[in-house]
Image (spheres, coloured by chain):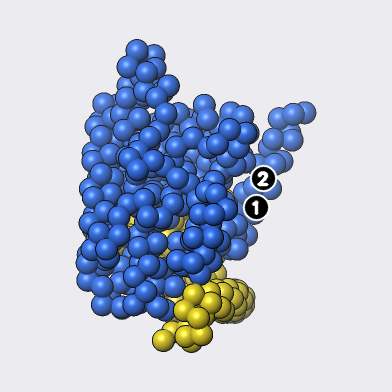
Chain colours: A blue, B yellow
Amino acid sequence: MSTFAEKIRETPSCREPAYRPVMWISDDEKRELDKKIGDANLYQDLFTMREMVRTSPKDVELKKALVSGIASAEFAGIDAFSRKVVEWQDWPVPQTLIMAMARQTWDEVRHAWLAKGLIESYGGQIGDYPDTLAGGAPPPGVTTQGPLTAGFGAQAEQLMREPVVSLSMTNVSLEGGALTLFQETSEVAEKIGDQLMAHCYDYNWADEVTHTAIGDFFVKQLTEDNPEEERKALRVHALAEGFRARLSGQQSEELRDFFAEEMTRATSALG
Amino acid sequence: MAVVAIDLSKCINCGWCRRVCPTETIKYFSTGHRTHVVEPDGCIDCGICAPVCPVDCIEAVPDYAVAPDKLAAAKDKAKQHAGAQRAMKLERDAIIARTLQKLHEGVPAGA
């Protein structure tokens, strides 16, 4: 690994104002959040937050909360994709993929700027609300349990560095899922007459289509003639989708069958 | 009646069509490959999937006839799906109404 990549890997994620994931905020701050949006527990569910904005369009705090929640993913995206630009130079991947990650980093920067401007138009600023998604290190003693950790345990961190795994998880599954969020948020914004919000999320939506296409294109290229790698990409996609489906209470029969088949394969492999 | 098919040369596997399909007849994880495929016998021609596709790769196959018993089974599945969706929406609406009521101290939700 290059010295620069090693240095980047050892450099923790940071931001100004600092990352403040909602799952680790203090009880006092949770109470503050309760006062602002009615129930701090709803804050992580962006779909519910969006419906609250639709139902109560004049409540500017709800709008700030919704946009702050989405913005936190943009900041996490800047961090994640810029690291890939450096780290993947050690992997046998096409240079065009590295350039695509650089482009994607810039896209996330623009999304963060849009979110910042939108929040400021509501009289707020980045940092008024905690982050809904990961970003920054957890407090000592806290272990995260994301979809990859749930599926691969201790190997998750190492696996996430692999281009096929990362692209399948982030670009194809998560960004593919974000299409729904942005489209529906834009529709809500139109409905409540918030043209600026609608415009911002239309813009983000268009970029997410490109990001999903980039991910799918390179996963296809990197797994060509390699059924094991293709299966791994599918497994990672299923884990991300399963995680999201459990949150929304909707898991398809196909996904359940896939996990059952995976379990059978794993059991057979153990002999 | 028509069914739909996915043009794999254009599909980016975002999965949006699969997630909105009320009969779960758009398959991906069971295909063995990273490809979204429509099982035509489960398609009820509801027209929900095509408009959400961001790359317009879902097309009608007008001359495919689904057997009546399969069509009936698919429609039953769609009804169950709609019922589950409605129940979830009502549950979410109730949570939102309670929260907004609390937040705005007595102001009815939706005002």
Residue at the disc numbered 1: A257
From the viewer's side, name the closer residue of A59 and A31. A31
Observer able to see residue B95: yes
In what element is the residue under mark 2?
helix
Count of marks overlaid on the render: 2
Residue count near mark 1 (Cα–Cα under 10 Å), binned few <14, some 14–19, many ≥20 = few
Asked if residue A103 is positioned above or below residue A50 in the image, the reply reads above
Which residue is at a point 57% across and 40% down the rendered structure image? A144
- Residue A44 coordinates in the image, percent (x, y): 50, 57
Tell me the kind of residue under disc 2. Glu
From the viewer's side, name the closer residue of A249 and B98. B98
Residue at the disc numbered 2: A261
Which residue is at a point 22% across and 67% down the rendered structure image? A196
- Residue A211 coordinates in the image, percent (x, y): 31, 46
Locate residue A17: give its quadrant: top left
Please give left or right for residue A51 compared with residue A142 in the image.
left
Q: Chain of mark 2?
A: A
Please give left or right for residue A111 compared with residue A141 in the image.
left
Cβ atoms at labels 1 and 2 below 8 Å apart? yes
In what element is the residue under mark 1?
helix
Which residue is at a point 34% across and 47% down the rendered structure image? A74
Q: Quadrant of the N terminus of chain A?
A: top left
Locate residue A103: give its quadrant: top left
The alpha-carbon separation of the residues under discs 1 and 2 comes to 6 Å
Asked if residue A160 is positioned above or below residue B8 in the image, the reply reads above
From the viewer's side, name the closer residue of B95 and B22. B95
Q: Are marks 1 and 2 on the same chain?
A: yes
Residue count near mark 2 (Cα–Cα under 10 Å), binned few <14, some 14–19, many ≥20 = few
Which numbered dot is residue A190?
none
